[in-house]
Image (spheres, grey):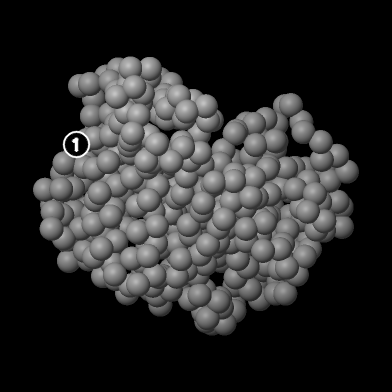
Amino acid sequence: MPTQSALKEALYAGAYDDRLRRVYVTDEAVHAQYDRYAALADEFARLYAGERDIRLFSAPGRTEVGGNHTDHNHGKVLAAGIDLDAVAAAAVNSENIVRVKSAGYSMDVVDLSDLSVQESEIGHSPALVRGMCQGFLNYGYKIGGFDAATASRVLSGSGLSSSAAYEVLVGTMLNYLYNDGKVDAVTIAKIAQYAENEYFGKPCGLMDQTACSVGSFVTIDFEDPKAPIIEEVKFDFASCGHALCIVDTKGNHADLTDEYGFIRSEMESVAQYFGKSVLREVSEAEFYSEISEIRKKVGDRAVLRAMHFYADNARVEKEVAALRAGDFESFKQYILESGSSSYMYNQNVFSVKKPTEQPVSLALAVSERVLKGKGAWRVHGGGFAGTIQAFVPLELLDTYKSEMERIFGEGACYVLSIRPVGGTEI
């Protein structure tokens, strides 16, 4: 492995181009990484004095593509890794201590001799490092000390899963530094979920971690949440003539926790009518045969949200089939149908608490005005405030981006691509 100075020389000489191209795809994107990774190597040398053998790592953020609010009722989702990533320069040490210094944050220091849950770390990044290390041991893999400097372009609060990218980055370093890259991507995702659930204190699902770890498009069936069925969906996004845009509407997420919770609880109230715990356990035919009675018990909004669940759950399979067939036009149509269902039936586009504040609704309306007949758009993630997703033809990209940023502010529109690989060593 090269030292800091040798690594920088090799970077600028193009010695890493083939490895970088596997991750970043285009020559332009590859060349844009030179300064970034060189600066990371310099930061590593500043933090950890001396010429040491440095290795480079990357893990992407993710976007939800299909299956809006289906996972918590054991449904199906379609997600994808994106070309915004978290990166690291790292080297092993013999101290049995992990040190991770992320740009803009204090250094995380974890002594591997004690990997028990630390109450003081709950909700903080050292918990994720500690949990990832314990998770590797739980699966029978090796761990050891290492020093790392990291930086991330997966913006916090953007709905692109910056925390999952960080977890997968730590897991990727452990994988290559101590396990010769033998730990598969799905296992790293499961360990990351364990770290977030048990150590960080957040009861997340598995979608974010899987999309970040596997990369490309990935579909997950949560019928058995303890053993989800995960499949990569091969599709060359770079060839489809579209950009993926995530628009941050700058909406206020405050006081929305109960709104998100109502979606799940109302869907589950329909399942409970049938003596089940989640909608996946109730057949669609059973549900529709009992609608007149269900609405009397749980209300009309719960019924509408159940209708969304069944339709969007089935729609994931159609989206996957379209991508596998290379039929991007049909795929876009299913994205539009999903967005319409979220708006009308799942009703997670604006909060009834503040009906005058509808930034997501506005972003969707403007998207329709600019992209109708050519692109696709939908609410992204939890909804109510925050982000929307759009697949924008490249010839309309400048128009779309400028219009969104004119309304929602400079930098509101992130222009992304689907990354072909997940967590990896460069």
Tell me where residue 283 appears, x and y as whole percent.
Answer: 43, 41
Q: Which quadrant would residue 372 be assigned to in this image?
A: bottom left
Front residue of this view, candidates 232 and 146: 232
Q: Which quadrant would residue 304 be assigned to in this image?
A: top left
Q: Residue at x 66, y 55 (%)?
A: 188
- Helix, strand or loop at label 1? It is helix
- Please state if 359 lies on the left or on the right of 174 as rendered: left
Q: Is residue 420 visible?
A: yes
Q: How many marks?
A: 1
Specify the amino acid type for callout 1. Answer: Leu
Tell me where residue 34 appears, x and y as whole percent.
Answer: 50, 70
Front residue of this view, candidates 15 and 251: 251
**221 vs 308: above or below:** below
* Crowd rating for badge 1 (residues with CA inside 10 Å; few <14, some 14–19, many 20+): some
Quadrant for the N terminus, please.
bottom right
Tell me where residue 360 appears, x and y as whole percent.
Answer: 26, 36
Q: Residue at x 55, y 58 (%)?
A: 230
Tell me where residue 227 appears, x and y as whole percent.
Answer: 63, 50
Q: Residue at x 80, y 49 (%)?
A: 138
Q: Which residue is mark 1?
A: 362
